[in-house]
Amino acid sequence: MRDPEDRAAAMADLWVDDRLAADDGNLLEKIDLALQRLDEGTYGVCAQCGGPIPVERLLAKPSVSLCVSCQESKETDH
């Protein structure tokens, strides 16, 4: 491809494909960890404070491992 616009479009497409694959990989890892917590009997327990994770939060995002308070704390620390 000699046209800079075509090259840029192709590079953007590759970047999007790579990002989607990485996001899918991260989600699969989180699902595997959630399944492991189910097996261990710790699903629904915050990995940081040990408190319960509300059912509503688990229904909205079953792969979460932190309660809302600990998640907010984590986000403000980064």
Image (cartoon, helix red, strand yellow):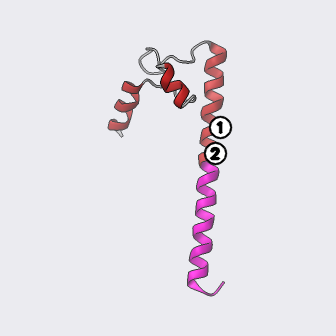
Pinpoint residue 61: horizontal percent, then vertical percent: 54, 31
Q: Is residue 20 magenta?
A: yes
Question: Given the current orientation, which residue lies at the most extreme top position?
Answer: 41
Residue sitting at x 57%, y 30%: 63
- Is there CB contact under 8 Å for labels 2 and 1? yes
Label 1 neighbour load within 10 Å: few <14, some 14-19, many 20+: few
Q: Is residue 24 magenta?
A: no
**Element type where label 2 sits in the image:** helix
Pinpoint residue 35: horizontal percent, then vertical percent: 66, 24
Pinpoint residue 46: horizontal percent, then vertical percent: 47, 19
Residue sitting at x 62%, y 73%: 10
Q: Nearer the viewer, residue 3 or 60?
A: 60
Q: Quadrant of the N terminus?
A: bottom right
Q: Which residues are magenta?
A: 1-22
Looking at the image, is 62 positioned above or below residue 22?
A: above
Label 2 neighbour load within 10 Å: few <14, some 14-19, many 20+: few
The residue where tag 2 is placed is: 24
Q: Of the residues shown, which amino acid type is indicated by label 2?
A: Asp
Residue sitting at x 60%, y 33%: 30
Q: Of the residues shown, which amino acid type is indicated by label 1?
A: Leu
Pinpoint residue 60: horizontal percent, then vertical percent: 52, 30
The residue where tag 1 is placed is: 28
SS assignment for the magenta stretch, majority: helix
Is 52 situated left or right of 32 in this image?
left
Looking at the image, is 23 positioned above or below residue 58?
A: below
**Element type where label 1 sits in the image:** helix
